[in-house]
Each structure stands twice: as structure tokens, then as C-alpha cells.
Image (cartoon, rainbow, N blue to C red):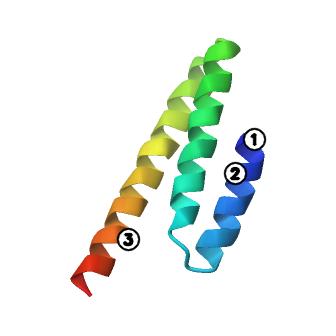
């Protein structure tokens, strides 16, 4: 699920569709879950950072659209 959401997210962002950020957030949340299941602190921390970066991108893109 994580990989499929990530790939679709890349495709959508490449087509300038902000829904791609939401899919990236789903992918990151899936990786965080995987990290907890496998007791991998690195995966949990890394995926959490990616989640926050994707959230920031979505918020900034949404604000830019409102300012235009």
C-alpha cells in the first residue's frame, strides 16, 4: 500500500495535482505503521519526517492557491 500510494503521489504531483501530497502522507503513515510492526526506529523516524514534509507541502500549496 505504501509503495502504491507513493508512486501514485509522484504521478499526481508531476501533473500538478495537490492530491499527490495526501497520497504521500498515506504512504508515510503506512511506513510508520510498518516501522512499529518491525520495531525499526529508523523507519518510524524517517517516515514521520517525510509525513511532516508532505503535510507542509500540502499546506503551502493550498495557501498559494488561496492567495492567487
Q: Residues within 10 Å of mark 1 (few under 14, many from 20)?
A: few
- Distance CA(mark 2)–CA(mark 3): 19 Å
Describe residue 52's horizontal placement relative to residue 29 as left or right.
left
- Residue at mark 2: 5
Indicate the secondary structure of the residue bearing disc 1. Answer: loop
Indicate the secondary structure of the residue bearing disc 2. Answer: helix
- Distance CA(mark 1)–CA(mark 3): 25 Å
Q: Residues within 10 Å of mark 2 (few under 14, many from 20)?
A: many
Q: Position of residue 53 (x, y in %)?
A: 43, 51
Q: Residue at x 46, y 39 (%)?
A: 49
- Residue at mark 3: 61
Residue found farthest to the left = 67
- Residue at mark 1: 1
Q: Is residue 59 above or below residue 62?
A: above
Describe residue 64's horizontal placement relative to residue 28 as left or right.
left
Q: Residue at x 41, y 52 (%)?
A: 55
Q: Which image quarter is the N terminus in?
A: top right
Amino acid at each position: 500500500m505504501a509503495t502504491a500510494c507513493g508512486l501514485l503521489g509522484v504521478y499526481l504531483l508531476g501533473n500538478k495535482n495537490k492530491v499527490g501530497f495526501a497520497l504521500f502522507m498515506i504512504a508515510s503513515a503506512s511506513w510508520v505503521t510498518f516501522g512499529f510492526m518491525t520495531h525499526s526506529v529508523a523507519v518510524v523516524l524517517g517516515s514521520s519526517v517525510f509525513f511532516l514534509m508532505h503535510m507542509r507541502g500540502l499546506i503551502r500549496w493550498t495557501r498559494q492557491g488561496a492567495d492567487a
